[in-house]
Structure formats: C-alpha cells, structure tokens
Image (spheres, grey):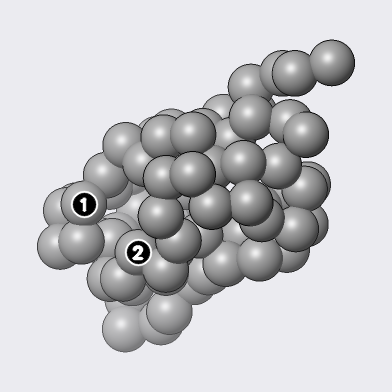
Amino acid sequence: MNTANKIAAEVTGMVWKVEAKVGDRLQADDVIMILESMKMEIPVMAPEAGVLSEILVAEGEPIREGQIVAVMSGA
C-alpha cells in the first residue's frame, strides 16, 4: 500500500543543507536535510523506508516549528 508521509520541522530556524533528492529511496533515519537553529545543526530524518517524493523548502529558507518540509511515499 502506497501512503504519503509528511515530515515536519521540529524547530524554528533555517534550512542549512538539503542532503537528499526527490526520487531518492531512503531507509528509516536517513538524513533528508539539516536545519540550523541557535547555531545548532538539527537533522531531519526519514521516519521510515520509502521514496522522497517532495522537498518543500530550499537551502537558506527560514522555517518554523511544525512546518511541513518534505513528503515521502511509503514503499
């Protein structure tokens, strides 16, 4: 069964670096992107195995806690 999994930012900050590309097959805990908040780097990780179907933010973009930053499709 194919389901979408929305991934939200856990902190307010900025997108420091996007590590994965749309279409990448990821395993649980693979890093999708790294956020910067208060001079700390916080990874955003895949919650489960699947395919990265959307990245909704760009490097350097400010984000807020709870904002959806990526979408994965279940395998």
**Furthest-left residue in view?**
60
**Mark found first going from the N terminus, 1 or 2:** 2
Task: State the quadrant of the N terminus.
Answer: top right
| Disc 2, SS | strand
Measured as percent of width and height from the top left, residue 48 is found at 78, 47
Res 21 label: none
Query: Please, what is the three-letter code of the amino acid marked with disc 1?
Result: Ala
| Disc 1, SS | loop
- Report the residue at 15% width, 62% height from top: 60
Identify the residue under disc 1: 58
In the rendered image, the vertical position of residue 8 relative to residue 37, given as above or below: above
Q: In screen coordinates, is 4 left or right of 32?
A: right
Could you classify mark 2 by the number of other residues whose Cα lies within 10 Å: few (under 14), some (14-19), or many (20 or more)? some
Task: State the quadrant of the C terminus.
Answer: top right
Measured as percent of width and height from the top left, residue 13 is found at 29, 60
- Report the residue at 59% width, 35% height from top: 72
Circles 1, 2 touching at the beta carbon (< 8 Å): yes
Identify the residue under disc 2: 18
In the rendered image, the vertical position of residue 12 relative to residue 52, given as above or below: below
In the rendered image, the vertical position of residue 12 relative to residue 71, given as above or below: below
**Furthest-right residue in view?**
1
Could you classify mark 1 by the number of other residues whose Cα lies within 10 Å: few (under 14), some (14-19), or many (20 or more)? some
Q: State the image quarter where residue 40 is shown.
A: bottom left
Measured as percent of width and height from the top left, residue 43 is found at 53, 69
- Report the residue at 64% width, 29% height from top: 73
**Mark 1 → mark 2, Cα distance in angstroms:** 7 Å
Measured as percent of width and height from the top left, residue 26 is found at 66, 55
- Report the residue at 42% width, 45% height from top: 22
Query: Please, what is the three-letter code of the amino acid marked with disc 2?
Result: Val
